[in-house]
Amino acid sequence: MTKSQVITCQNCKSQFVIDAEDFQFYEKIKVPPPTFCPECRLQRRLAWRNERALYKRKCDLCEKDIIAMYPADTKFPVYCRSCWFSDKWDATDYGRDYDFSKPFFVQFSELLEAVPRVALQVDMSTDCDYCNQIGTCKNCYLITSASDCEDSMFSYRLLYSKNIVDGWAVIRCENCYECLQSLESANMKFCDQGVSSVDLLFCYDTRGSQSCFMSSNLRGKKHVFRNQEFTKEEYKRKISEIDTGSYANLEKYKEEYGQMRLASIHKFTIEKQAINSSGDSLGYTKNCKGCFYSSDSEDLKFCLLLNNAKDAYDVNNGCCGMERSYEVSTVGVNTYDVKLSADIWPEAREITYSQCCRNGANNLFGCVGMRKKQYCVLNKQYSKEDYESLVSGAIEHMRSMPYTDAKGRTYKYGEFFPTEISLFSYNETMAHDFLPLTKEKAGELGYGWKAGKEKHYEITTSAESLPNHIRDVKDDITQEILGCLHKGTCEHRCTKAFRITPNELVFYRKMNLALPRLCPNCRHYERFRSRNPLKLWKRRCMCEGKQRVKGQSPNTHENISEHFHGLNVCPNEFETSYAPERPEVVYCEACYNAEVV
């Protein structure tokens, strides 16, 4: 068995460790060990997934007006969903012979620039015209990275949920507004980490709780108001005085919530039944190491945003029965043995170095836009025997004639696609969302950057002039063009102007919520920036026994229970996404459970 090795990343030059178990996985799927560190590998994959940068253009086949994740000036044709999935064209028409006189990625890039692409990744969904990267959704607007959702708006990473507005990483929830990292809950507003809870307002880290306001670290509680428990009647009287229909009130509540959240105990990781796992925001996982925002999965490492996945390394955005995958950006629905690829859905098997291949495709190498095809290299069909022989030769060719990008990074067989041949500019992709760069830094690294198109909206109502209370908002507000409060001065891809949709207005009135003053993009990125980074630090528990915590937080916490370490400082260490310089009080699982369970 190969022992652990320390490697220097050829991209960022930092050192990283490849463990013995990693070498076992690489040997099993027949790839060499990586030369990029885990974070650089993630960045490289995310630069191949666009979710929120949408453009108006025409379908290059039927010429109808469409919304697409590709602008009108792309080199390759872009088809609406109906045309792309029709029999009016065949991806094998773009097939070409493998050329052993030039690097593989040069040939693959040429194929990328020729084959038609589908405008949006939207599967089995209805009335979701302004959504992308979703499946099995109904009547949704501006949601991304979602599956099996209904009647939801302005949200990211929704699964099996209904009536969610401005949500982030919400699973099996209903009737929620401005909620983050929540699971199996309903009727919540402005909540983070609400699990199996109902009727919460401005609450943080609650499980099995009901009817609570401005409270945190709750377990199986009812009628808690500002972290104090009351009778049902007393709680009703107090909550009746809380009016979220007023924008002025909301701003005060948000400030109080921020202070309360900071003063709360923070468990070193967010998890529910995460067995032998590390990372953050994990639910029902087993043997998942260095993973984030993943659930119902096992035997993963360095993965992000997976659901119902097994036996995979370095995969982001996958779900619904995917197994044995490596270095893939977007994959799922009963896929098997997919590696070094992007956008592979569904029922696909044994796919390598391919992009946008779907619907039962199998045994593909270096292919683009293939459906129901097998034994193809660079979109050209072969017999099984000839395919296997050519793939073997192509792999050896990639080793002997590697691709070198403009910054001198070398790509042999086993490396994911170079970022410089991505279909998207860096600031259009998830890479910029999770690992933001300035335009200058992106240029230094050789990544593309798309200049924003100047838009001149005739704003009819400024954010400052909107009615304070939702009850004073008239129906004709849906006809107005509202000015965003940020006015384009932030770093949130501010659209400067936005509209309130009729369904949105109905939701705000039903939930007694003041109209938002920020455009959907600014609201999205404010939620995005509030999450912890996709990085782990080794730290020690901050608990000091019955003594008052003297950590870096200006808000101290005094334990209410006896802990296993008595009056001594807790000796437990862990990996956490809370950086050492953060102000929160971070506890190990034992100390956390002693205080809040």
Image (cartoon, rainbow, N blue to C red):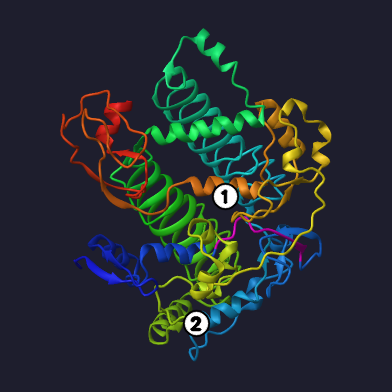
In the displayed structure image, the side of residue 487 where residue 302 appears, left or right: left
Look at the numbered disc 2 and give the secondary structure of its residue: loop
Q: Is residue 264 magenta?
A: no
Residue occupying image coordinates x 61% and y 68%: 369
Taken as a whole, is the magenta stretch helix, strand or loop? loop
Specify the farthest residue to the bottom.
101
The amino acid sitting under disc 2 is Ala
Q: Residue at x 52, y 39 (%)?
A: 170
Q: Mark 1: which secondary structure?
A: helix
* Relative height, residue 54 to residue 6 (above, below): above
Q: Are marks 2 and 1 in contact (CB under 8 Å)?
A: no
Q: Nearer the viewer, residue 342 or 520?
A: 520
Q: Mark 1 is on which residue type? A: Tyr
Image quadrant assignment for residue 324: bottom left
Closer to the chain start, of discs 2 and 1, is 2
Residue 221, x across and y down, in percent: 42, 19
**Mark number, residue 144:** none
For label 1, the residue is 525
454 relative to 287, above or below: below
Give the residue displayed 30% in from the left and 62% down from the top. 25
Residue 15 x/y as whole percent: 29, 68
Q: In the image, residue 439 lies at what x, y percent?
A: 56, 68
Per the image, the residue denoted by label 2 is 406
Quadrant containing the C terminus is top left
How packed is label 2: few (under 14 Cα within 10 Å), some, or many (20 or more)?
Answer: few
> Magenta segment, which residues?
49-59
For the residue pair 473 and 297, the one nearer the viewer reads as 473
16 vs 555: above or below: below
Looking at this view, is 543 or 251 the one in front?
251
